Image: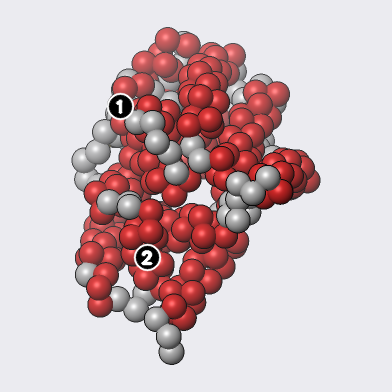
Amino acid sequence: MTQSQPIEAAYAACRAIAKREAKNFYYAFVALPAHKRDAMCAIYAFMRRADDISDDESKDRATRREELASWTAAWRDGERTTNPVFVAVRDTQQRFNIPDDLLEQLIQGTAMDVQPETAARRDADGLNTFTTFAELYQYCYYVASVVGLVCIRIFGYSSPVAEKLAEETGIAFQLTNILRDVREDAERARVYIPEDDLKGAGTSAAELAQVKTGRELVEPQRLALAGIARRARAYYHSADRLLPLISADSRPALRVLVKIYSRLLKRIEEQRFDVFTARVQVPTWQKLLILSGGLIRMLALRLRGRVR
């Protein structure tokens, strides 16, 4: 077996994971050149496994922390690993100069919800909450912005300004996810809308969590969710500024991702923040339409000789 064969097999395994699990992200991966697409699939597979360990609610938090620590130790000992995800990630790190520190932060982000003490705390009603938006921003940085900082190393960039813009683009994506997942999070005793925002709108984390039991969403709760949507919209402007700063062959993919996530936010707004009746999603046909635009841009670049 040649040296390239196990690496190719490792990337194939990561592609299979991304295709099965990535949903919104995979549509953007398709619009990348093959070597960057493989790298993104490797990072996604790495992140997915860490998430799965942290989110496995069939096990208590202590057990999940132990399993995540064991998994992380196996990754750190990557020189001797046969795990295909670790093999692909190590190759990706070497190709795109991704430091271990960023992946360590990525793992830290996935572990935040199972740590005994994080920025989140339990309130009098037993809910995991944040007091201020600054605390929520820190959480979003670890679970989303770090992903953006890894991605732009794969995309390619030259201006250091791109790093702050990638950070803020990750915030936009994660705030959109938080709005979409309010019901599911409440069922896990988590309310990510900061207490300061809820109080300012005239409601509370406990009241928002009770909506899941069938109570109708009331205007103060809509106002609180709308405030998070406004913050997300502001951070999406950073994505617009980031696009011209990354390599031309990666812009179609980032554009696809931004359009899908901003469309998700728009659908939440159009439904007046009723994320309790049913899970809000971007229909597959709309994702495919957005992807087709990205692929057309990729083809145009290829015809001009700017993408292999």
Residue 234 placement, left or right of 288 = left
Q: Residue 233: percent from the left, percent from the top? A: 54, 21
* 31 and 80: which is toward the camera: 31
Q: Quadrant of residue 43?
A: bottom left
The residue furthest bottom is 1
Residue 299, above or below 123: below
Residue 244, above or below 32: above
Q: Amino acid at mark 1?
A: Glu
Q: Quadrant of residue 63?
A: bottom left
Is tag 2's residue or tag 1's residue first in the polypeptide sequence?
A: 2
Q: Residue 286: percent from the left, percent from the top? A: 75, 41
The residue sitting at 54% across, 14% down in the picture is 223
Q: Quadrant of the C terminus?
A: bottom right
Q: CA distance from mark 2 to mark 1?
A: 34 Å
Mark 2: which secondary structure? helix
Q: Are marks 2 and 1 in contact (CB under 8 Å)?
A: no
The residue sitting at 77% across, 42% down in the picture is 289
Residue 32 placement, left or right of 102 = right
The residue singled out by tag 2 in the image is: 91
The residue sitting at 64% across, 34% down in the picture is 259
Q: Amino acid at mark 2?
A: Asp
The residue singled out by tag 1 in the image is: 135
Residue 214 placement, left or right of 83 = right
The residue sitting at 43% across, 89% down in the picture is 1
Q: Residue 242: percent from the left, percent from the top? A: 49, 29
Q: Residue 279: percent from the left, percent from the top? A: 64, 41
Q: Quadrant of residue 42?
A: bottom left
